[in-house]
Amino acid sequence: MLKKLSRALALLILPFIASLLIRLIYLTNKKKYHVPESIGDEPTIFACWHGELLMLPYIYLYYRKKPHAKVLISPHFDGKLISKTIKYFGLDTIAGSSNRNAARVLIQAMKSLKAGFDIGITPDGPKGPRHEVADGIIIMAQKTKTKVVLVKMVPTKFWQLNSWDKFIIPKPFGVLNYYATLPIEIESMELEKARTLIKEELEKHEV
């Protein structure tokens, strides 16, 4: 009972605090965008590594002045915290993972793409292995004929957690370097070729 109450309070308070901290980090850093000027208006799959997702709402908002996206998030407690946090940036979520209810989540994501939503996904989430691309993003892109934009943020000053994903938290008063690819079409690629391409692009500009 006490655990449920503490978690309920955490879900009520922590996402708001986290959203303020993300905004504070963004405002107290210089920003450099090493990105294409445009990626088009059609529904797109945006992907980044799990450990680099903290500041990524801003690169999405760089391209979409009116957010219209759903992000695939773990259904566990930490995923719920992330889900509520990104709502402060206008982003919706689909709860699920590559390990549980994978087919249902993929179907929901594909329906959302066809309905005009962008999709956000971490190819190595929610539990890893770190920097290994799971099949979900490739299947989703190929089944819906949707292009993929690979994004990342590389800070000049940061803390790195001792978690499975080596989660990165930028420090204030540095530089946030944002990177994005042009939309990549993987519809006709073999699974392993697409996996290698995504991994190689996401591993560029490592911290």
Image (tube, rainbow, N blue to C red):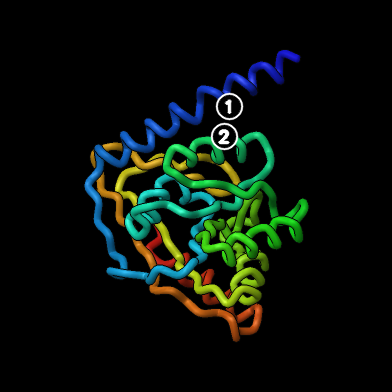
Residue 5 x/y as whole percent:
67, 16
Q: Earlier in the sequence, mark 1 or mark 2?
A: 1
Three-letter residue code for mark 1: Leu
At 28% across and 37% down in the image, what residue appears? 172
Residue 77 x/y as whole percent:
65, 34
Local crowd size for mark 1, using a 10 Å CA cut-off: few (<14), some (14–19), many (≥20) = some
Residue positioned most to the front: 115
Q: Are marks 1 and 2 in contact (CB under 8 Å)?
A: yes
At 61% across and 40% down in the image, what residue appears? 79
Please tell me how many numbered marks the rendered image carries: 2
Q: Quadrant of the N terminus?
A: top right
Q: Nearer the viewer, residue 151 or 200?
A: 151
Classify residue 111 by image quadrant: bottom right
Residue positioned most to the top: 2
Q: Nearer the viewer, residue 139 or 110?
A: 110
Residue positioned most to the bottom: 188
Say whether residue 110 is visible.
yes
Q: Secondary structure at mark 1?
A: helix
Residue at the spot of label 2:
81
At 32% across and 56% down in the image, what residue appears? 62
Three-letter residue code for mark 2: Leu
At 63% across and 60% down in the image, what residue appears? 109
Q: Is residue 179 above or below residue 6?
A: below
Q: Nearer the viewer, residue 70 or 21?
A: 70
Q: Quadrant of the C terminus?
A: bottom left
Residue 47 x/y as whole percent:
50, 61
Q: Nearer the viewer, residue 51 or 17?
A: 17
Residue at the spot of label 1:
11
CA separation in Å, label 1 and label 2: 6 Å
138 left or right, relative to 58? right
Q: Secondary structure at mark 2?
A: helix
Q: Is residue 5 above or below residue 197?
A: above
